[in-house]
Amino acid sequence: MAKTDTTKITPASFTEVLKSMQGPVSMTSLVQPQLEQFWDAQEKLLAESERFTRHWFERRHEAIRTALDAARSATAADPSNPAEAMETVMDWQRHSVERMVEDAREWFDTVSRCADYVTKTEAEAVEETLGEARDIARKATKSAKSEPV
């Protein structure tokens, strides 16, 4: 006698498994707050990242423009007064350090805003999920206690 392979999943058996999972607990309502929070957070994080990189590139463009101006000034300076050329270069370097400090400050602000947003929305999603779970449990308990008609 041939042995039947019970490990084979057919579309009909898969449908039956899914139907059996539709009982009183709907996973969709439990997962939905987490999914919405995740995609909302992704959107916010992308917007924050875009803002940071736009400002970073603006500062890099400024660095290039001012470097060219400084190079022109330094090479056009009186050759008998090298201190003038050095002063021009040092002024450019000072502004470059200021730009790098602004890069770091804005980066830390960006990361802080992102972490704050994700933390708050995650807490809200967990609270919403718990509320959904309570509602489902209450409905399941109520229907289990009800008398058959």
Image (spheres, grey):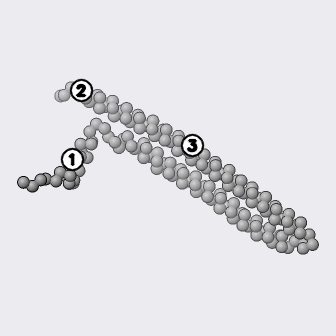
Instruction: Estimate the x, y position of residue 35 in percent, counting from the top left.
Output: 42, 46
Q: Find residue 135 and report its image quarter.
A: top left
Which quarter shows the C terminus? Answer: top left
Between 99 and 55, the one nearer to me in the picture? 99
Instruction: Estimate the x, y position of residue 133 in percent, counting from the top left.
Output: 37, 35
Residue at 23% over, 49% down: 15
The kind of residue tagged 3 is Asp
> Circle 1 is placed at which residue position?
16
| Up/down of 63 relative to 143, above or below | below
| Circle number at residue 35 | none
Instruction: Estimate the x, y position of residue 127 in percent, counting from the top left.
Output: 45, 35
| Up/down of 93 relative to 137, above or below | below
> Circle 3 is placed at which residue position?
116
Disc with the residue nearer the chain's start (3 vs 2)? 3
The kind of residue tagged 1 is Glu
Residue at 54% over, 51% down: 45
Q: From the viewer's perspective, is 53 left or right of 33?
A: right
Evaluate if marks 1 and 3 touch, with contact meaning CB atoms under 8 Å apart: no
The kind of residue tagged 2 is Ser
> Circle 2 is placed at which residue position?
146
Q: CA distance from mark 3 to mark 2?
A: 45 Å
Disc with the residue nearer the chain's start (2 vs 1)? 1
Residue at 41% over, 38% down: 129
